[in-house]
């Protein structure tokens, strides 16, 4: 097996990733993984759903069918840093019995196995499939639009899809790609503000308040009836050198396009107070907590602090649960949040009504889904029928058994 260098980076360097695999001056920088021994998870699993699960209609805010296969790595070193980082998160936040081996993880995840994992192995009712435009490091962007379109077409009652749009392309190409995504049924658009320049190999980014690059894209999306724009932010943000991963540029964009809802992906990862200030100032910005819902699995104190910042200062109707499946399994995240109680003496509450909104009610409202009617619609499909007869399927069972 090929061995790769054991890059030892400082915390600041780890936080300096420009996107999921950004490179600064040619050196890989990645998001911080919990230290060894930090995660303490119960190894037990039960096919019986959590006793509280029936109270909630769950819409997973971010799910991915990754393509980590070697043939898909366009810039091998940077792409392998992404792979190394995400696989470490998987190992850190998954009980040992259910962890995937390198071969089981580092491959092209198929769309069908993603929906089976999410809907058969957890109490998730719907999900938003996020395609990813990381065309600088992966030939298909890491999570292809083809997989998203496939799931939207085959599972329209279960899957919403945010298509990946590459804003680094010339405007006419961006418009053409956006038109194609709309024609394929995309429910929203997913953007990445950073990349590695293909000619210079330097990290670069675009800002959302750029009136020449970004605003024409938003204008076109608005004209095509798009209402949801998800933007990858905060992971890797360290200050002016990674401005495109910061959130200051969202103020003017959100104000200029009030018809659009800007979903801030990875909200809660860091900069709690700054994010809260943005959301208080711009009501068309949401907090999609992809990543922070792992906090209860290894740092409950951090989760308490994050929830305090948001629940005390932001409308709960704009806080959104996300698992990042298939990298992380939703089973343990959901069970942890079903049981979540703020610490004794806390000056905020998270009752069942708040949990219901965060776990799915908010996304249902944004996408015009009648939860009661949707429950009835899903009751007889293959996922509900299988779980009714067998209970939950064991986590990652198909991947672990081949």
Image (tube, rainbow, N blue to C red):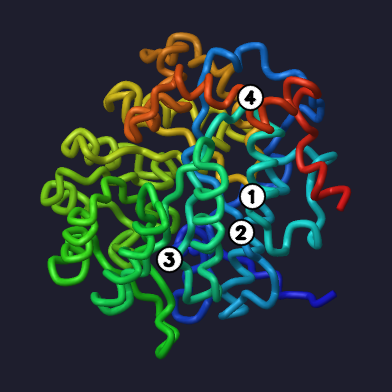
Indicate the secondary structure of the residue bearing disc 3.
loop
Q: Are marks 2 and 1 in contact (CB under 8 Å)?
A: yes
SS at circle 1: loop
What residue appears at the point 63 percent right and 35 percent down from the top-left corner? 330
* C-alpha gap between disc 2 and disc 3: 19 Å
Which residue appears at 30% of the width and 76% of the height? 173
Q: Earlier in the sequence, mark 3 or mark 4?
A: 3
What residue is shown with label 3? 18
The residues bearing labels 2 and 4 have C-alpha atoms spaced at a distance of 29 Å
Rounded to the nearest angstrom, the CA distance separating label 3 from label 1 is 20 Å
In the image, taking residue 238 as reference, residue 211 lies left or right, namely left
Crowdedness near tag 2: few (<14), some (14–19) or many (≥20) residues, C-alpha within 10 Å: many
Per the model, the C-alpha gap separating discs 2 and 1 is 8 Å
Which residue is the site of mark 1?
327
Q: Can residue 227 be seen by looking at this rendering?
A: yes
Q: Earlier in the sequence, mark 2 or mark 4?
A: 2
Disc 2 vs disc 3: which is toward the camera? 2
Bin the neighbour count of mark 3 within 10 Å (Cα to Cα): few under 14, some 14-19, many 20 and up. many
**Does residue 91 sit above or below 106 in this rendering?**
above
Q: For mark 1, does the 10 Å Cα neighbourhood hold few (<14), some (14 to 19), or many (20 or more) residues?
A: many
């Amino acid at each position: 097996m090929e061995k790769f260098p054991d890059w030892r980076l400082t915390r600041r360097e780890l936080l300096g990733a420009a996107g999921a695999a950004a490179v600064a001056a040619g050196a890989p920088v990645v998001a911080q993984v919990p230290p060894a021994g930090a995660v303490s998870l119960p190894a037990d699993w039960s096919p019986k759903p959590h006793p509280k699960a029936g109270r909630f209609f769950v819409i997973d805010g971010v799910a991915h069918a990754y393509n980590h296969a070697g043939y898909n790595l366009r810039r091998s070193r940077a792409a392998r840093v992404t792979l190394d980082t995400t696989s470490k998160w998987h190992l850190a936040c998954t009980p040992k019995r259910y962890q995937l081996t390198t071969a089981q993880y580092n491959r092209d995840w198929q769309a069908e196995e993603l929906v089976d994992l999410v809907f058969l192995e957890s109490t998730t009712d719907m999900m938003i499939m996020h395609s990813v435009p990381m065309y600088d490091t992966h030939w298909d962007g890491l999570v292809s639009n083809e997989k998203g379109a496939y799931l939207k077409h085959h599972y329209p009652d279960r899957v919403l899809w945010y298509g990946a749009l590459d804003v680094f392309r010339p405007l006419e190409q961006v418009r053409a790609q956006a038109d194609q995504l709309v024609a394929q049924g995309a429910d929203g658009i997913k953007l990445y503000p950073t990349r590695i320049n293909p000619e210079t190999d330097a990290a670069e980014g675009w800002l959302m308040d750029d009136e020449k690059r970004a605003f024409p894209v938003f204008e076109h999306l608005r004209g095509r009836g798009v209402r949801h724009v998800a933007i990858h932010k905060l992971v890797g943000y360290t200050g002016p050198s990674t401005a495109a991963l910061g959130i200051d540029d969202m103020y003017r964009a959100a104000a200029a396009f009030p018809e659009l809802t800007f979903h801030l992906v990875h909200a809660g990862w860091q900069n709690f107070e700054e994010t809260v200030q943005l959301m208080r100032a711009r009501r068309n910005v949401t907090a999609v907590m992809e990543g922070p819902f792992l906090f209860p699995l290894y740092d409950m104190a951090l989760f308490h602090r994050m929830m305090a910042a948001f629940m005390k200062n932001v409308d709960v109707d704009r806080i959104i649960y996300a698992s990042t499946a298939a990298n992380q399994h939703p089973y343990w995240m959901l069970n942890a949040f079903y049981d979540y109680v703020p610490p004794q003496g806390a000056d905020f509450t998270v009752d069942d009504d708040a949990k219901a909104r965060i776990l799915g009610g908010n996304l249902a409202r944004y996408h015009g889904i009648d939860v009661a009617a949707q429950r009835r619609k899903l009751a007889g499909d293959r996922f509900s029928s299988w779980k009714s007869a067998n209970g939950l399927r064991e986590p990652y069972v198909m991947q672990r058994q081949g």
